[in-house]
Image (cartoon, grey):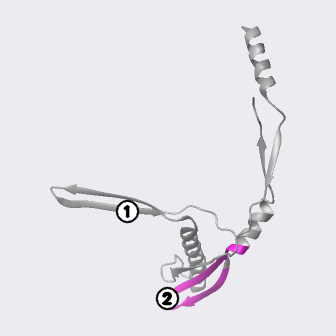
Amino acid sequence: MNIWFIVIMLILSACASEDRYIEWEIQQPESFPKLTAIGYATLASQPSKDKSQRVLMAMKASKIAAYRELAEQVYGQELSASSKVNEWMLTDDMIQASVTGIIRGAKVVKSYPAGEHYVTELELDFSQVWALYQQNNPIQKIKDVTYF
């Protein structure tokens, strides 16, 4: 039994040729889009009695809402829906939406109160995203192993 294992391993190792690495660079696009997103948060619904604390909380909430808007533009939004019908009447209708993604390189353009809301405007310049990507992944390598 051990002899067969050794023979099989020798055959498999003899079939492998020299390991090679293939390098390539991703080409830069001709133009880069700029995406914008606006997030809103109500001041009154923030859970604090102190007005300045409510403003800070609304600022943060509006920024998160703006990032969600950017993520929806970049990655799309996943929808899940269901409906129930009983005796030819709609008895239950449910829709859920979610988005998952990482946004890098966005900047806050404006952040300001507007009446009873706080507003944050974000911009995502894909030339900045490209630069960040190039810093993290300058050259891609794949190990190419050729077998007989």
Mark 2 residue element: loop
Q: Real-space Cα distance between discs 2 and 1? A: 29 Å
Quadrant, the C terminus: top right
The stretch of residues the image draws in magenta is 108-127
- Reply yes or no: does residue 106 show up in magenta: no
Q: Which quadrant holds residue 8?
A: top right
Relative to 18, 81 lies left or right: left
Q: Which residue is mark 2?
A: 116
* Residue 109 percent across, percent down from the top left: 66, 84
**Front-most of 8 and 131?**
8
Q: Which residue is mark 1?
A: 95
**Front-most of 87 and 135?**
135
Q: Does 89 appear above or below 49?
A: above
Circle 2: is it few (<14), some (14-19), or many (20+) Cα within 10 Å? Answer: few
* Residue 39 percent across, percent down from the top left: 55, 79
**Front-most of 46 and 80?**
80
Relative to 6, 34 lies left or right: left
* Residue 144 percent across, percent down from the top left: 77, 41
Relative to 112, 42 lies left or right: left
Q: As drawn, which residue projects farthest toward the left?
A: 87
Q: Which quadrant holds residue 120?
A: bottom right
Q: As drawn, which residue projects farthest toward the bottom?
A: 115
- Reply yes or no: does residue 126 show up in magenta: yes
Q: Which of pointers 2 and 1 lies earlier in the amino acid sequence?
A: 1
Numbered disc total: 2
Amino acid type, residue under disc 2 in the picture: Glu
